Image (cartoon, rainbow, N blue to C red):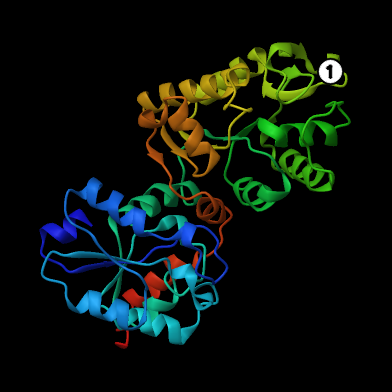
Amino acid sequence: MRYLHEHGARTIVLSHLGRPDGKRVPSLTLRPVAAELSHRLGVPVAFATDCIGPVAQVATEAMRDGAIVLLENVRFHPEEEANDPAFARRLAALGDLYVNDAFGTAHRAHASTEGIARYLPAAAGFLMEAELRALEPLTQQPREPFVCAIGGAKVKDKVGVFTHLLERVDAFVIGGGMANTFLAAQNMNVGTSLRDADLEPARAILALALHKDVAFELPTDAVVSTAFDADRNAQTVPLWDIGDEMILDIGPETAQRYAAILREAKTIVFNGPMGVYERAPYRAGTRLIGEAIAAATRAGATSVVGGGDAAAAAHELGFAAAMTHVSTGGGATLEYLEGKTLPGVAALERAATQTAPHA
């Protein structure tokens, strides 16, 4: 947006906030965002109280060269998430060129991310371009060894990621709640720890990893406690000594083993913390993994941090700046790593090969 402003473009900003379900929810208005955006850019940002109709039209027609206008939350209209063509045309009618710089919503086929590109010449923004350039090598010709450090809560949410990456990855190091599911799938006691109720997806992934001869590293020790918020009871135990406790982080032995693997890698994906990093007793595992990835990156490895919790952990624990790329994606990153087509990206690719009819 700063680039467009400096080059005299009249920039109309479309965005969403929250899940208002197609209704006008005052707490989800973008008006405060306009003020913060103005502060960040150092230039005035006007705000229009609707994204279509007379209000939007008046606001955009009054723009001078270099002006920026933020339109109200597009999700206040149910047609946005429905990707309604008529709504997309009304959005398109406000401008002459469409730029999508929101990789984090590229996996959504919504009017402002996919539909509008059918009615205007379309291009990727700088962030979108950077995301795709960083992620593409992970699914094309990654340098080996290729290691994935995957944490987070549920195996079932990442079955597609595991299946797709098992064709390319040399090793996985697993932490977080999903490690508990894989351990339980191998008949290990994980006490009262968070895990999937259905263990079959985990068993299928373990079998596929064995078939593909991909190293699949799981914890051998853990930091446990009697309850999620009982920090004073945190202690490190071997996996075979777990009773009714709750696993809340990988243990130091596991973290050192994972770190040694990561330091030798040439391509690394970090997608999910190793434990409940938000609480001091359970962040050591994620921090040590992050430090190992940073060391590998300084030695020449390519490291990509998935969006969502992984990116939050990287920033919170101070290793984000050392990574090759920290994605803003979350869901979009996961779907990309699954090999899925992202509608927002596909719309830009389609627009690049044809002349879009003006609205």
Q: Position of residue 290 (x, y in %)?
A: 49, 25
Instruction: Kindly state the secondary structure of the residue where label 1 is placed.
Output: loop
* Label 1: how many Cα within 10 Å (few below 14, some 14–19, many 20+): many
Quarter the N terminus occupies: bottom left
Q: Position of residue 70 (x, y in %)?
A: 30, 64
Up-down: is 46 above or below 114?
above
**Is 22 on the left or on the right of 90, as rendered?**
right
Q: Position of residue 288 (x, y in %)?
A: 53, 19
Residue at (35% x, 53% y) in the render: 32
Q: Quadrant of residue 52?
A: bottom left
Report whether residue 144 is seen.
Answer: no
Query: Type of residue at label 1?
Result: Ile
Q: Position of residue 225 (x, y in %)?
A: 75, 18
**Is 88 on the left or on the right of 45, as rendered?**
right
- Residue closest to the eye, 97 or 228: 228
Residue at (59% x, 21% y) in the render: 285
**Is 89 on the left or on the right of 226, as rendered?**
left
Give the labeled residue for mark 1.
242
**Is 153 on the left or on the right of 148, as rendered?**
right
- Residue closest to the eye, 124 or 263: 124
- Residue closest to the eye, 229 or 342: 229
Q: How many marks?
A: 1
Up-down: is 40 above or below 280?
below
